[in-house]
Every structure is written in C-alpha cells, then in structure tokens.
Amino acid sequence: MGTKATLLLLLAVLCYGLASTAAHHHHHGEEEEGGGGGGGDWRGEGEEMEDRHHRGEKAFLLRDWKRVVHTDAGEMRVLRSFRSQRSAERSTRIGFINMEPSTLFIPQYTDSGLVLFVRKGEARLGTIYRNEPVERSLRKGDVYRIPAGSAFYLVNTGESRKLRVICSIEIDTSEEDLPTRNFQSFFLGGGPNPASILTGFDPETLATAFNVSSGEVQEILSREIEGPIVHMSDSRRPSAWSKFMELDEQDRLRHLRKAVREYGDEDEDEDEDEQIEWSWRKLLESVLGRRRRPESRDEWGHRHAPDSCNLYDRSPDFRNDYGWSVALDEYDYKPLRHSGIGIYLVNLSPGSMMAPHVNPTATEYGIVLSGSGTIQIGYPNGSSAMNARVREGDVFWIPRNRPQFLAGRNSVLRAMGGPELARSFGVSDKRLAELLRAQRESVILPSPEAAAGGPDQGFDGGDLVADF
C-alpha cells in the first residue's frame, strides 16, 4: 500500500448462537433504493459504486438496503441480511441512523433489540428503565443497548455536526407465527406522519382513557406532519417536538413515562430468558413499555440504569507495531448478555493484515469505518469465496467462525505441528517447522516491506474497521 496509505478501521459484530448454514446467498428484496451499502452516504452524494459483480461479493458484501425512515432532518437505513436454508433463532440486521444537527428521532419503541454504536457526533438518549425515565449522554465510540419494547428517543445534541450511529438490530424469529418478521418501529407520538400507535383507537376511547375531550384528542393526533426525525428548532413554525425538547430533563422524562405508563405489579423480577407469551395482557404490557428484565446493580447492590461503554476508552486487547484490536462482550458490558453479540474493533496500519483465521461459533458482520483494504474469504473445501476491495461504508458478513488463527506465532497450525500435520501437507517435519516459524508476529501481521524495514509510520488520520 505504501507509506501514503491510510490505516484501516473495522467494526465487527460477532453474532453467537445463529443456526449454522449449509448454503447461503444474499437476498435481494422487492425494494431497491440504491446500489450502495448502508453506510454509502459516508462516501459523498452521487458517487457511484464500483461495478463489481463477482459471485463471492454478491454473497458476502451486503448492499441490499432499505430506507425505513427519511425526512429532511435525517434517515435510517437497514441492510437486509442473507437468507439461509435453515432458520435461525435470532436474526441480526445492520442499520445506519444519520441525523442532521439539532434534530430529534421522536419517542418510539421497536419490536427488536438495538445495540447502538456512535460512529460520529454526540447524542442524548432518553429511555425508560424499570418504570423510571432516564437520559444518557452518548459520544463517539459509545455502545448502548436498548431492549426490545423499551420506549426511547434520540437527540443529536451537536449544533453544527451530523450524528452517525451504527445499529445491530436483534430480530427474534423463534416465534412460529413470526418466521420472517422484519424490524418495526412503533411511534408513541405522531399523527398523520408518522402514525402514532394511538391512532389505531377511536377518539372516544382515547378521550375516555385520557380523561379529556374528543376534540383535544383529535387536535393532538392531527398536528405532527414532519416525520419520525424532526428539526428541534424551525423558524417557519413551532414544532410540538421543539416544545418537548425545550422542557427540562425531568419534565421530558416525566412526559415520556406518561406515554408508556405501566399497569399491574411493578415488583416482577423475572429472568430475561423467559419467552413472553402473546396473551392480550402481555401484549398490552409490551405496547405500554413494561420491562421484564433483570436490572443491573451497582457495587452497593442498588438497581440502576446501565451506562454506555466507550470502545475508544478501552485498552487494546492486542497491540503490536502493525495495529491493535479491542473486543467488547457480555463480560465487559453486561447489557450485551442477552443480545447474543459481541463487538470487535480493529485498527490496521498501512500494509498490515489480520492473520487468516476461522471461527465456527459466531457469524461476523464487518463495517469499514474508514480506510480501504482487501477482504478474502475461503470456503471449507479450499476454494476462494471472495477476494474483494472494501472501503469506508462497506458492510460484509462472514459465516460463523471462532478466532482460530491459521498463521502467525500463536496459530493453531503452529501449536499442532508434528509429523501428522507434516504428512498431511506431504512435506518433512523440518520443512513444515521452517514454514510455520517464519512468521514471528501474531494476530496482526506486517506486509513484506514492513517486515523488512520496520512498520510504516503515519497514524495521522488513521482508519478503522469494526465487527459486530
């Protein structure tokens, strides 16, 4: 790549517990809104994607996305995942939320759990935790999980900077009657656009429920026409959401709590692994925001809402002269315990590479945060599945695997060694040992040029790739 090459930053989402797939392909849905990946807008408007149609790229580069929210204040895109011949208990989608400065993603809840990673900007997240409203400030590198059915809103607090958020969307497909369920938002506020969940009831019913007149109900449900993502300050006319955000924190949270006021006993302490039966009572509890999850406890044993965890603040789990990596899982961040995912951040210096590895227990979704590089994937039969260039905004997936490095100082081949392995390659023990011991580095390996003359310098403006 040369000394002028930028670093590569990769975010990877590791999805554990997915059913294994004997065969898989990329699914192209009925709605095509563009040829780019979910993060294609990072590359600039109007820039065309490279015309690459290799079979491997079609299978492993995810470029079939759907715009689920779009206003002049922002948008949300969701990438369609591969469809396998075998169903999985949990399906993971990757989404991208892009918000203009001083905008609000209005209060809502979703039927899927969300794990948010703040790529750029700063935000304020309001949600309900054990019947109590809370707000959390989020910044670049923060990870935060929102369980399915939890009401929340998201504010871009930057007055001049856009907000970029990457989402891992946990879609539970274990219900027999919901085998192909898609990600769905339910807006607490709204009216004509977006439709509030309240509009499904007639005005008289709502008037009785809220103890107000039918006219007041009609007035509230007919005013919002800006869409799910709105500007908080609009000189053209006052916005209901602008007024909402002008309230102090406690008043905002009190209003959010009223919108999802719960019924019944609040002392339930049931385990999160328990499946929620689709009775009318529990359906209403879900709609109204009931939390059926165990709460974290601080060091004194008090229950509290979880904080975010910042990837960039963590010390690398691995580092050498050619890059570093940091991982986040349920042991580091307890809210991930029931999500079935881990997050992996990799920084590669110019010319370096991650050692070839396989992983039989987790499916990986990788998002290129910045930089460019090459991704190679091999089939179990030894043939090449993909050999493609990737750059900022690209998303790819790798069938389930567990980090078993095949090259480098700590590789499984080097650990096994011996005459049996040499025999399988048809070479002598000595020749195999020479081959396996030639690489002195592990995990992140240098290019031939770097190995001969030392690592490239120039970490300024370095780029990263991240894995879910």
Image (tube, grey):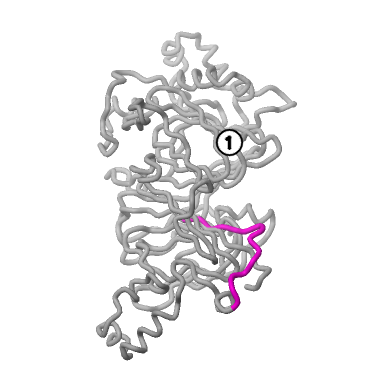
- Residue 69: percent from left, percent from top: 56, 41
Residue in the foreground of this view, choosing between 395 and 12: 12
Left or right of 315 in this view: 238? right
- Rendered-image quadrant of the N terminus: bottom right
- Circle 1 sits in a helix, a strand or a loop, which is it? strand
Q: Is residue 74 left or right of residue 414?
A: right
Pinpoint residue 271: horizontal percent, then vertical percent.
Answer: 26, 34
The residue under the point 41% across, 74% down is 407
* The residue positioned farthest toward the right in the image shown: 235
Q: Quadrant of residue 289?
A: top left
Q: Is residue 111 left or right of residue 465?
A: left
* Residue shown at the point (51%, 31%) measured from the top left: 136
The stretch of residues the image draws in magenta is 453-468
* Residue found 45% across the figure and 29% down from its top: 151
- What secondary structure is the stretch in magenta mostly built from? loop
Amino acid type, callout 1: Ala
Residue annotated with mark 1: 123
Q: Where is residue 272 in the image (x, y as percent from the top left)?
A: 29, 36
Image point 71% across, 38% down: which residue?
160
